[in-house]
Image (cartoon, rainbow, N blue to C red):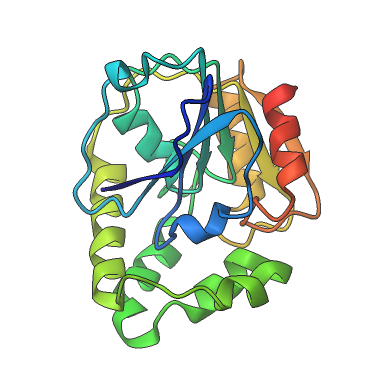
Amino acid sequence: MEKRWLVKNNNPDLIVFALGWACEPQAIAHIRPSGYDILCLYDYRAPSALSSHEFEAYRAVYLFAWSFGVTMAERLLASVPFRKAIALNGTPYPVDDRFGIPIRPFRLTLRSIRSAGTDAFERRTYGAFYPQAASWTPSRDIEAKTEELETLYHLSVSSPRPPFCWHTALIGGQDLIFPPENQHACWQELSPQTRIVYAPDSPHYPFADPQRIMELMAE
């Protein structure tokens, strides 16, 4: 697992971003609200849980977990007392016919990624934001991305979920990775205390509008 501080200026509050598969900090580089330190987690090939002691200096800690980052946040950050934990276009059951990505298309992606690459996946992920995303310089090759996806798959189907409280779940109506109907089913049936926010025009990538992201934290 990679952990990168994007802002560390002894601000009173902290935002933690748990990113999705094959994603890197460039995905949130344009999100820089004043008054917050920002920590980014990504590349989960060697996951390692973080202790709440690492965040004791902060008055409040907020979490945005995107895509596979939702289930990874539950496993890596279960001891952190978040002021608010917000799931973005993902569920705690990321590979599941009813509550996540259906198993068959996921396995097809896993089998073909070495030969097909990730371009088609990224086009579905970023939607209209794809031209900006395509300009980012990746630091990992296709083998590293494949290893990460294999790790995420095995964790998603074999590891028990620790207790975790999600305050809000954003569901993008144009999400072509996690079917919106499966996201709705997961939160409504398994976590009814979680507030659902439906964004009908949003693709799988939720960070194109930084203002909307910060509004979720304030709501």
How many callouts does the rendering have?
0
Q: Residue furthest bottom?
A: 115
Quadrant position of residue 187: top right
| Above or below 122: residue 5 | above
In the depicted view, which residue is nearer to us: 99 or 44? 44
Quadrant position of residue 47: top left
- How far from the left and from the top, in percent, is residue 207? 65, 51
Q: Is residue 125 left or right of residue 170?
A: left
Question: Residue at left 32%, top 55%?
Answer: 43
Quadrant position of residue 29: bottom right
In the depicted view, which residue is nearer to us: 189 or 132? 132
| Above or below 118: residue 92 | above
- How far from the left and from the top, in percent, is residue 63? 51, 30
In the depicted view, which residue is nearer to us: 14 or 47? 14
- How far from the left and from the top, in percent, is residue 194? 61, 21
Question: Residue at left 43%, top 59%?
Answer: 24
Q: Residue furthest front?
A: 9
In the depicted view, which residue is nearer to us: 208 or 111? 208
